[in-house]
Image (spheres, rainbow, N blue to C red):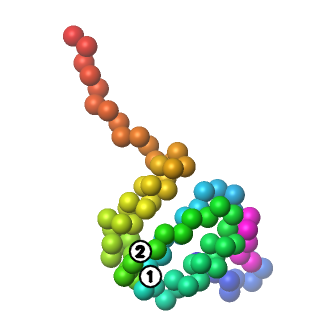
Amino acid sequence: MMDEGVSGTEPNPERIACPTVILTGSEDSAHQRAFALKARIPNCELKVLPGAGHACQMEQPWLFDRFLIEFLTRHGLFPAASKPAIAMV
C-alpha cells in the first residue's frame, strides 16, 4: 500500500490509468481494505486467494501465477509462448 505518512503526498488511486489487478489473500489483515481500493481505481480487477494471508504469492504460487498470467494475457501484456524455430532444409 502507499505510504500515507509522507508529508506532501496523497494517494490518488482514481488517477491510475493503466490495467490494474489487486491480488489479496482472504486471511490477510489488509484484505477488507482491498475492496475499498478496488472501488477507487477505474477498471480495476480484484482476485482473492482463499485461505492465503499477506504473502499469498508464496503461500499459493500456482493460483497467484494463474491469476496474474490471465490478467496480463487479457491486456496483451504477457508474451505469447515462443515457438521453436523450424529449420528449412
**Which percent across, then down, holds residue 29?**
49, 89
Residue 55 appears in the rendering: no
Q: Can residue 14 be found in the magenta stretch?
A: yes
Mark 2, secondary structure of its residue = strand
The residue at the far bottom in this view is: 29
Q: Farthest residue in the right direction?
A: 8
**Relative depth, front residue between 46 and 11:** 46
Q: Quadrant of residue 26?
A: bottom left
At horizontal 69% and vertical 58% (from top left) the residue drawn is: 17
| Coordinates of residue 13 in the picture (x, y in percent) | 69, 70
Number of numbered discs on residues = 2
Type of amino acid at the residue the image marks with label 2: Leu
Please determine whether, in this image, residue 30 is positioned above or below residue 49.
below
- Residue at 44% x, 79% y is 25
Give the extent of the magenta segment: 10-15
Whether residue 34 is visible here, answered yes or no, is yes
Within the magenta stretch, is there residue 61? no
Residue 11 relative to residue 56: left or right: right
Query: Is 8 on the left-hand or right-hand side of 2?
Result: right
Which residue is labeled 1 in the image? 26
Quadrant into which the N terminus falls: bottom right
